[in-house]
Image (cartoon, grey):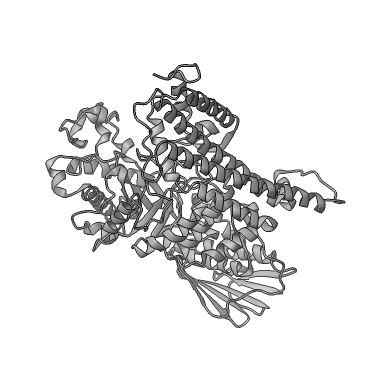
Amino acid sequence: MNILIVNPFAGADQQTAVWAAAEETVDFRGDPAGAARCTLSFAATELKAFLARTLDGAGIAFAAAPRPCDFLIELRVLEPAGKASAFTLEPRAGGVRITGDGRTGTLFGAYELLRLQGWRWFAPGPEGELAPPPATRLAVPPQPVRGEPSFSLGRGFDFGCVSMESAELCLWMARNRLNVSGCRPATGPLCEKLGMSPALGGHIFEEILHPDRMLPSGRSLWEEHPDWFGLPANGRREKATAQQTQFCACRPELMDFLGDELLAYLNGKWRMAERIYLWGFDTWGSTCRCPDCQRLGNSSDQMLQIASQLRARIDRAAATGRLGHRPRLVLCAYEGTATLDGPQQPVPQNLVDAGDCITFYPINRCYAHDFAANGCSWNRPYRTSLVSWTGQQPGLPVTIGEYYNVSKFEDLPLLFTARIAADLPAYHRLGARGMTYMHLPMVNWAMRTLTQLLYAQVAWDVQTDVPSFLAEYFDRWYGPHATRLRQAYELLEEGWLACAQWRAWCAKSILSQLLQWDGRRPEQPLPGNDHLAPGGGLVAAGRHAAGLMDQALALVEQAQADERARQAQASRGTAGGTAVNPAQQRAQELQGARYEKRLGEDRRLLIYGRDVMAIMTEMADYHDALYRRDAPAAAAGWQRLEQLADQLDRYCLPINFEEPGAGLVSRDALTRSQLRDCLRRCRQAGAGSGETGT
């Protein structure tokens, strides 16, 4: 079969592959035609590469205009300067036309055509590519297919650390129709080619308004402008606690200072960013109590007034040529900045007109229950707060920021299959139009592969047939081991349903309570919370959860044994070979060891998850034994704790990130459990020495 891919730019016959790799030289903001040519050319090369592996012996060529062929694929874009994600696939006589609303949509349409052939991209890199069986013809939809995202404001991840970037991950995101990326130096041009919206920022004001920051006058910021810092409830500004209260929203000279700082960022290291996250100090509740700020309304009103003043300065700079673009400001509705509840006053009109938006972060939500569940005491207040934002008229568009891999959960084998399936449609019904989460694991996804895939799919289409999606995932990812692994996933998800009650940031989580404990004999029992009963009920729940993970681990290990036997049978009489370079080594590993590698990665992460649940549970049991003055139980419990600590201290969780700044670290599993210091305090209090910790 001769396939012709029409890339609608003069010279496409010879130059398509060149343009597809030209992202480092394209001015994506200043040259929209060049940007569209780069993205559509890349779409054309992706089609060629994957279709060549779909159809045996197919001849595939590029052209700027149609000409006679066996099958014609036409690429079009309605708005070359835009990044709209929607697309249309139109069957035509002898071929198909792919039309993107923006250049991003054309690329997504190309991937949709490949999906119709059976291609899937479950994980980054060649390891995550799933090819269809060889075919003799291409699948074409019988009727036009319209693809458009449910969450049109954007779908992506919060990349919290500078070193979080990967070219293979960026490609995986595009192939799964995600379109908001962290703006990083090595992958920024690639993300632009893929039609993504680069984002930067976060809690930036801690650095900009550090009390010890030196000013040109030779004096510190605190020495020169103590009134810029928020007035605490006690009425006394003090340098040591200056960033424990939000800065004042009613100081024009402060807004001028912040505006100049922001413009310097936007013209410098943030010049490629289209979305700027502007989050206040992480104060957990304290906002400026000066009379002027109090007259503005609640904490969200204060935040919106600050954003409005900064927006006005950005717009003036753009109008006068001091700034070449107007980025979207992304504010946060979040407990840490006291902005979870919507404003009491109308949203400033300049924010509405600019298309600025809010990300709503329910940091301590419950994952044992759906977000919209009426009976959950943890989720009910968040739902009320979300509606207070989405119900604003006029208001700001709302993105939901989830916490599937935030630092308290980081690198645990948590599964949110039931929650994603129910919550994302609920968020959409409640008025949210964007999705993000903290923080995408960069490597060693293991069973979390399903989390990333399902998140991407349902964010694109909240009407997804989730049972069919799951059936395909297990069948294609695990092949002959699908049934066992599905059972293992279900056990694991059940075991960690109460992950928030065990480990969330809030003071009532078990981890937070243990981190506050000095290791001595407590005067009060560990309180537990309304989802985990204190005392013996808490310990029983933890041991039950760890037992579920042991059952899951047994299933994975059974699948591994079956896979080893299967490989031994398949390899009889075949010759080996030595790889001569890393690429060949990777190809050889993929040739026969896909299931082996997936199951091994699942096993390793599952062991860590079981160990973390076990050590939290035994620490709670030891605390309870000390409280009850039960010395034999405390001694036995401490022995179990030391054994678990030794076990966790024997292996590392592969990658973590330094913050702020660039850098990677590799921490042992005990440290990553966050309980090493708690164990140390217990030892200092006499644990294991025959003392009772009094």
Residue drawn 64% across the image and 60% down it: 475
Screen quadrant of the N terminus:
bottom right
Residue 679 located left or right of residue 356? right
Residue 203 percent coordinates (x, y): 34, 42
Quadrant of residue 22 in the image? bottom right
Residue drawn 36% across the image and 36% down it: 527
Residue 581 percent coordinates (x, y): 73, 43
Most distant residue in the right direction: 573
Residue 557 percent coordinates (x, y): 67, 45
In the rendered image, is residue 387 in sight? yes
Screen quadrant of the C terminus:
top left
Residue 229 located left or right of residue 536? left
Residue toward you, 472 or 168? 472
Most distant residue in the bottom direction: 93
Residue toward you, 72 or 649? 649
Residue 538 percent coordinates (x, y): 44, 39
Residue 245 located left or right of residue 81? left
Residue drawn 20% across the image and 32% down it: 225
Residue toward you, 615 or 458? 615
